Amino acid sequence: MAVKKMKKLQPMTNIVWWMILLFAGTQDAVYGRPFQQDSQPTAVEVTDDSGKFEIGVYYARWTLNPIISSFRDSLNEELGKQIRDDVVDRVIDKYNRFLNPTDFEEDFSFDASGPNYGIEFRYYPQGRLGSFSMGLSLDKIKMRIAGEGSVRQNFDDQTYAEADGSGEIILSPIFTSLSFRWDFMPRWRVTPYYSMGLGLAVVGKEKRSGETVDYDKSDRITWEYEGFYHWVTGPIKLDEGGDQLTLKEAEEEGDFNIPNIFPLIMINFGVRAEIMPFLYLRGEVGFYDGLAVRFGVSGRF
């Protein structure tokens, strides 16, 4: 009778033993101990203390269009005033007459984009098996904010001047940032991740040589236009005009003001792929006081 019971229990005993062996093998894979079975193709077998440091380079494209509406009015007013003042001066100089300006109209549309490239250093406290990392990056950006439209200045003698113009603001800041990143599946060869961080950007910096001040020409505002003066005999074409100023010179001549230092907020979502041991490709979409698409390569050691 006991023999019959043992025969009935034999299949269940075999199942239990197979479950124990499978569980032991899974634990070996998790903790990095030698495991004879083939691992999953998407997993990377590593030790806990490997790959704590990472260095990478990347290239990105920026756009400020989704948030440019927050300062569209100030850009519209500043570019319009620069062109308006130049047109009015040309009319007064050409016709040698006193004009008393009344109401003023401007209408410009803007587009903002630009490239940037940088280098990043990251630290993973738990090595390649850990999902959390801290990063310090240094970026060089070139942002172009371009606008085009028209201005009209009316005078009290029923005449007016108008111009079709375009302009751009070039910003070339250098910014440094501290970020925190979490890899969803750190042991997988391909894993999504997200990161967030803060940084500081510096623009419009002065270059000094002895007592001579040479403003950085890489950060500037430029405009050009074609204008007409309308009076009793009809429209009269004015000479084409325009100018280029550094941001500092624009501040000194008018109300235009961009801070030399301003903060940046970063929130990124991306994918990292290991193309060979300790070498990775990365692509991400992020918000950096604007939208950015970034691609890079990095190495762990």
Image: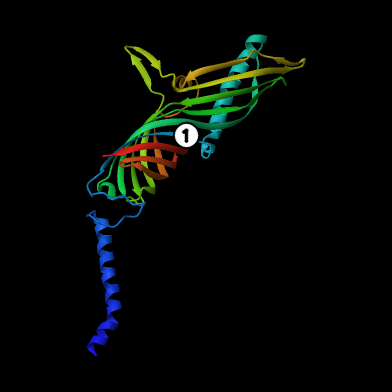
Left or right of residue 162: residue 285: left
What crowding class fits label 1: few (fewer than 14 Cα within 10 Å), some (14-19), or many (20 or more)? some
Q: What x and y, as percent, mark residue 36?
A: 26, 56
Foreground of the two, 176 or 234: 176
Residue depicted at 22% across the width and 88% down the height = 2
Residue 96 seen in this snapshot: no
Q: Quadrant of residue 265?
A: top left
Q: Is residue 167 visible?
A: yes
Is 277 left or right of 102, judged from the image as shown?
left
In this rendering, the count of numbered labels is 1
Q: Nearer the viewer, residue 124 or 260?
A: 124
Q: How is the image coloured?
A: rainbow
Q: Which residue is mark 1?
A: 61
- Could you tell me residue 90's position as x and y percent? 62, 13
Q: Position of residue 109 (x, y in %)?
A: 60, 32
Q: Secondary structure at mark 1?
A: strand
At a point 29% along the width and 83% down the height, the residue shown is 8
Q: Quadrant of the N terminus?
A: bottom left
Q: Name the residue at 46% across, 38% down.
A: 292
Farthest residue, direction bottom: 1
**94 sits to left or right of 220:** right
Task: From this view, report whether residue 203 is shown above or below residue 285.
Answer: above
Left or right of 277? Residue 254 is right
Amino acid type of the residue tagged 1 in the rendering = Arg
Note whether 114 is above or below 236 in the view shown: below
